[in-house]
Amino acid sequence: MDHNLKIKSIKSSFKISSAKVSEGNYLGRPAAYNLFYTYTIDSISYKNLNSEISIHRDYIAYFLGKEFPVIYSTKHPKRSMLLVFPENFEYWGLPFPDSLQWVIKYHDVY
């Protein structure tokens, strides 16, 4: 799916729910992972991915099985983005929750 279309769709009408990280796919570059996550909206389960999350490969295990906020389009719930790091929340104008402070030490900004 076109990234810009996804962003536009979410911005037009969104809600926030919770998603569970199910797997991480190393992209072969320093600190570059795709995180696959699942979430349920109106009894329908969705599996999606966030591309190129900046996590050092030695730390990916800390994210697997964990729950994070997910922002999704109310019109097209499959269109979503996982909110993990402070800049993800900042992009959407949302406050970074205290409950996620632990992720900052695993964030690899390159």
Image: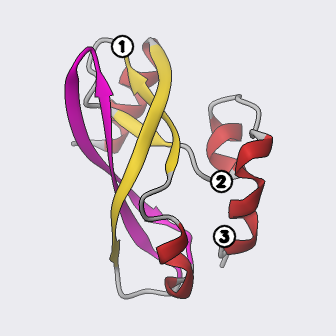
Going by the numbered disc 3, the residue's amino acid type is: His
Going by the numbered disc 2, the residue's amino acid type is: Phe
Tell me which segment is drawn in magenta.
Answer: 31-55
| Tag 3 residue | 107
101 vs 52, left or right, is right
Going by the numbered disc 1, the residue's amino acid type is: Thr
Circle 1 SS class: loop
Mark 1, Cα crowd under 10 Å, few <14 / some 14-19 / many 20+, is some
13 vs 47, left or right, is right
Sequence order check, earlier mark of 1 and 3 = 1
| Tag 2 residue | 85
Q: Indicate the quadrant containing the N terminus: top left, top right, bottom left or bottom right.
A: top left
Sequence order check, earlier mark of 2 and 1 = 1
Circle 3 SS class: loop
Q: Residue 88's spot in the image, x, y percent?
A: 62, 45
Residues 61 and 107: in front is 61
